[in-house]
Image: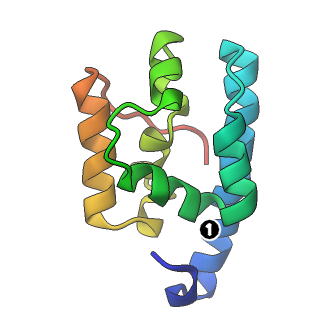
Amino acid sequence: MQVSAMDEDQVVRAARFHEAMLAGCDEAWRACRYNPTYFRRMVLELGGVTAVQRLLASPEEFHEGLTRLWECKRLDLSVENWVLHPAWAPLFTDAEQAIAHRRLASVGYEPTHPPS
């Protein structure tokens, strides 16, 4: 969903999602000693929603973050998992959610709901 197409509630939700993505970067460091520098830069430059949309649009099924979080057994911190969370799902299209679900399913992970 493009920012210009968002209503006021969606703008607030997108801002909260942006902060959640930055907090997720911090937690990835604490939990896995994985510093998602490139993703953090994308979030800061593009905003959380657009950064995640770009990752989902990538033809690369297993981006570095997904791989590192899988190795650490913390796929709950993956952007794919966050996209499927009921609090954030309205920010993403059905197609984007399907990509997220497919990527998680391909590694045998059942989506969970991280704190919103």
Q: Residue at x 47, y 25 (%)?
A: 75
Q: Which residue is mark 1?
A: 14
Quadrant of the image containing the N terminus: bottom left
Up the image or down, 55 lies above or below 7; here it is: above
**At 76% from the left edge and 19% from the top edge, which residue is drawn?**
30
- Report the label total: 1
Q: Is residue 39 left or right of residue 105?
A: right
Q: Is residue 97 above or below residue 105?
A: below
Q: Is residue 49 above or below residue 72?
A: below
Query: Which residue is at 28% across, 49% downward?
Result: 99
Q: Is residue 20 visible?
A: no
Residue at the image position 72 percent from the left and 14 percent from the top = 33
Q: Along the horizontal axis of the image, is 46 left or right of 102?
A: right
Q: Decide: is 50 above or below 59.
A: below
Q: Dot 1, how many residues are within 10 Å of its Cα: few (below 14), some (14-19), or many (20+)? A: many
Frontmost residue, 29 versus 12? 29
Q: Is residue 97 visible?
A: yes
Under mark 1, the amino acid is Ala
The one of 27 and 115 positioned closer to us in this rendering: 27
What element does badge 1 sit on? helix
**Res 34 quadrant in image:** top right
